[in-house]
Image: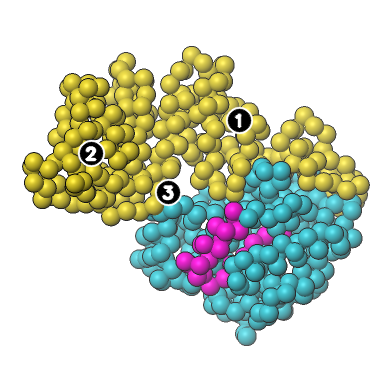
Amino acid sequence: MTVTQTTFRSAILDSQQDRPIGLSDAKGQPAGRRFDVYRNNVAISLTEALATGFPTIAKLIGHENFNAVAAIFLRQSPPASPLMMHYGAGFPEFLRDFEPLAHLGYLGDVADLELALRQSYHAADATPITPDALETVPPEQLGEVTFSFAPAVLVQQSPWPLHAIWSFNMQDGPKPEAVAQDVVIMRPEFDPEPHALPPGGYTCLKSLMSGDTLGIAAAKATEADNAFDLGAALTLLLSGNALTSITIST
Amino acid sequence: MYDAPQPPKGLPNLPGVGYKPQHYNDLLANSGTVGWLEVHAENYMGDGGRPIAQLRELTKRFPISVHGVGLSIGGEGHLDSEHLARLKHLVDWLNPTVFSEHLAWSTHDGAFLNDLLPLPYTDDTLTRVCDHIDQLQTTIGRQMMLENPSSYLAFDESTLSEPDFLREVAKRTGCGLLLDVNNVFVSATNLNYDPKQYIADYPLEHVGEIHLGGHDEDEDDHGKPLLIDSHGAPVVDPVWALLDHTLSLSGPRPILIEWDTDVPEWPILHAEAERADIALSKVTA
C-alpha cells in the first residue's frame, strides 16, 4: 500500500497512467480526480514558467500552440533544480528538433536569445568604466588595450534576422528583412537590452571577450568583414555599460 | 535538535505580505499597516540584477521572512546539497529575521516538479523529515519553521495525524512551526474534519508565523467540495473566522497575506493586511 515518490512522480507527469493505489478521500474511496489537482498544478506551473521565460516564442507560434509544445517539453525535461529562473535551458534544442515546427527554422535561435536575456537579467552586478576612460589612453597604445566585460554581456551569432524578429514581436519594431543578424545583450542597469551587431561586430566582441587586445580584435573583425567600424563598436559597448575595466598590456 | 526559543522570536506581531516586485514603489512610498515582508528564497538565488538589488533595499526597511519553496524536506532522497548551499548563502548575506519551509516534497530522481507534493504520516517519514530539518538547521545555523500543507487526498498508510506529526517534528528537531490557516480550512474541507479540532490539536506554542491566502473551489468525483490552494484570491470569510479562533487560543502572531497569482494592485493587497491588523487588535498578548 506504500505509494512511493517514484510512483507518484511518474503518475503526475503521465496522465495516461493510472492514479497510484493507496490514495483516498475522507471515506476511503480512491482519490480519483483529487490526484489530478497535483497533475494540473505541475503542468500549469511549469507551462507558465516556460511562457514567462519564452514570451517571443509564445507570440510567434500562438499561445495555444505554445501550451501544447510546453506540455510535451515539460514531461520529457522537467526542471533539474528548484531555480525556476534557469528552467528551459534545453528548450532551444527541443524546438530545433521538433518536427511539427521545423518550417520555423529560427525558433531555436530566438529561444536561445530569450534564455540569454534571462541569464543577463540575473547576472552579477558590475561597475562600468566611464565613456571617457578610453580617452586617457595615449593614441599610440590603443591597440594594446584589453577590456573586461560585465557578466551581463552576452553575444549570439545567428543566420536569421534575430534581433529584428525579437524586436518585431516584443517592441513593435519594423518587419524583419531576410538578413543574418548577430546580437549583443547588454544590461545598462537592470534591464537587459539586445542590440543588432554591425558588420564584424560579433568577431570583434568574441575576440575582446577572450582577452585579445583591441588591435588584434579589430584586425580579426576587419578580416571577417571589411566594413567593420571600430569606433561604432566601442561606442555601442560604452553606451551599454558593457566594459568594466581597461588595461594597457605591455 | 536545535536549541531555540519557543515560539520562534523575531517577526513583529503585525501583518506582513508576500513581496511582489510590482509593489516595490508602493511599499517604499507608504507600506501602511504592513510591518514585514516575506520572499520566496528561490527567486533570490541569481548572481545579481534587480531582484537582489530590491531585496537589499527592502531589508533596510522591513524585517524579512525567507520562505523556501524548493528544498523538498519531505523527499525520499537526500536533500540537494547544492540547494542547501544556496540557502546558506542567501541566509548568510541577507540575515533574514526568520526562515521557513514546507512539510512537502517537490524533487525526486533529479526532477523538480514545482509543486508542494504530499507525504504519508508514518514513523518512517517522521524520521526522514526530522533528519532533513536537522541537516538544514545545521547548515544555515539557525532555527527554521515548518509549514502545514494543503491536502487534497489522504494516504492509506498514514498512522499519525498531521498535528501529531508536526508536534513530534518540533519536539525532535527544535524547529518552529508556521501555521497556514487557509491550508487548515482547505484540508479540513477536503478530508471532512473539523478545522477547529485541528487547531485544538495543533501545538500552537511552537507557532512563530501564520499564513493566510485564497483558494479555488472545485468538486471531486462524488460531487463533494474540493478546495484548491491557489494564493490567487482574497481570503474567504470562514478562514478569517478560523483565524480569529486561532488567535484567541495562541495570542497575537505575525500574520502573512499570500497572493502569488493574479497579483492585485497594492490597495487590494493592503486591504487584506488591514483586515489581519483588525484581527490582531482583537487579541491581547
* Percent coordinates x, y for residue B38 in the rendering: 53, 64
Q: Colour of chain A?
A: yellow
- Residue B234 lies in what quarter of the image? bottom right
Range of the magenta residues?
B82-103
Say if residue A52 shows up in the picture: yes
Along the viewing direction, whichever of B147 and B187 lies nearer the viewer: B147
Marks 2 and 1, how far apart at CA:
43 Å
Looking at the image, which residue sits at the far bottom? B285
Residue position marked by numbered label 3 in the rendering: A122
Say if residue B221 shows up in the picture: no
* Percent coordinates x, y for residue A70 in the rendering: 58, 31
Whether residue A137 is in magenta: the answer is: no
Q: Residue at horizontal 30%, vertical 40%?
A: A211
> How many neighbours does mark 1 have within 10 angstroms: few (below 14), some (14-19), or many (20 or more)?
many
First-in-chain label (1 vs 3): 1
Q: Residue at horizontal 60%, vertical 79%?
A: B9
Numbered disc in front, either 1 or 3:
3
* Percent coordinates x, y for residue B192 in the rendering: 83, 57
Badge 1 element: helix
Q: Chain B is drawn in which colour?
A: cyan
Name the mark on residue A73.
Answer: 1
* Percent coordinates x, y for residue A231 in the rendering: 14, 35
Quadrant in which the N terminus of chain B appears: bottom right
Residue position marked by numbered label 2 in the rendering: A213
Badge 2 element: loop
Marks 1 and 3, how far apart at CA:
24 Å
